[in-house]
Image (spheres, helix red, strand yellow):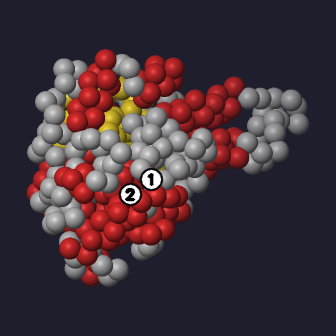
Amino acid sequence: MTLADILSRIVQPDEKMMGAVQKKVDNLTKPPGSLGVLEEMVIRLAGIQRTEAPTLRKKAVVVMCGDHGVVEEGVSAFPPEVTGLMMDNFARGGAAINVFSRRMGAEVIVVDVGSKAKTSPGVRAEKVRAGTNNMAQGAAMSREEAVAAIEVGIRIAVELAREGYQAVALGDMGIGNTTPSTALTAAVTGRSVTELTGKGTGIDEEKRKVKEAIIERALHINGIEKNWRAKLEPIDVLARVGGLEIAGLVGLTLGAAANRMAVLVDGVIAGAAALIAYEICPAVLPYLFASHLSEEPAHRAALEYLELTPALYLRMRLGEGSGAVLLFPLLEASLAMLNEMATFADLGL
């Protein structure tokens, strides 16, 4: 299914169903609104699934993997070979996302959409190209490559929907990918690169300043100025200063929304993907659930731009979808609240 096909299928959640569930939640044996975000989540799930009885029978995390030419500039504390090593680790079930997902009952799907490594057994091979170009010297990829990576994510979302999945968490792996994510966030939100540039995988302050300068240079070289919307489309920005795994997550987000699936947004990379998906199609917004607040400053900026409130703050900055899957138990708690709590009518009131 193409990008154009999927965009035509994204519609707003069912307000009638949301109103019905809101009424039921307000009549549970508690003060109205006293369970806060849990109430908001289950009402949105009802609208997304278009039913007064939403469920969460099957859930997944999709870890998109890709490499970045900008690592040549020394923006990461780790060498690019780690991307391939981590794909092996995911396939063996030894990474944090595997451990957390086993506890949460979520399926882990690992996708090589753009690494330089040989695709590991157990990893889905969807390589558009072997890593991006160095965005500090020109466009990271072509528009056509960005669209191809987006359509990888769309295909996976469509498959998951057909298999009965109702929620998907956005995961990522790619050494150096906080650099393009910060560039994308700066472009979309208009915030300064100085404000948004964090320490990623753990670089020191000196390297952080170098990273900041590289992002500024990449935006300038690629013609992404404050008024970029007058001459560029969001996909152009993604192609020039983005990443293949970020593009894959954009497609996954759009595809999930078109197929009435909740989308759990992880940290700064997933946040950048959510921003681009929103810029392409604002109708995706009600499908997005902010799981946690990352330590990366660009993540806060992305969530504020989207007006999403994170449910958790755990000082995390790992990626992989590791924060997003931790929201699954809270979604399940919200469903239990709806289905199992007594109403005031049950008490004879």
Q: Amino acid type of disc 1? A: Asp
Please say whether residue 80 is visible from this viewpoint: yes
Mark 1 is surrounded, within 10 Å at the Cα level, by few (under 14), some (14 to 19) or many (20 or more) other residues, namely few
Q: Quadrant of the C terminus?
A: top right
Residue at figure coordinates x 22%, y 64% from the top left = 136
Disc 2 + disc 1, Cβ < 8 Å: yes
Give how far across and how far down residue 210 sits, in percent.
35, 63
Closer to the camera in the image, 42 or 123: 123
Q: Is residue 212 above or below residue 30?
A: below
Q: Quadrant of the N terminus?
A: top left
Q: Amino acid type of disc 2? A: Lys
- Mark 2 lies on a secondary structure that is helix
According to the picture, the residue beneath numbered tag 1 turns out to be 204
Quarter-of-image position of residue 217:
bottom left
Quarter-of-image position of residue 191:
bottom left
Residue at figure coordinates x 77%, y 29% from the top left = 342
Give how far across and how far down residue 128 sits, in percent.
12, 44
Relative to 207, 79 lies left or right: left
Q: Is residue 321 above or below residue 189?
A: above
Outermost residue toward the front?
Answer: 206
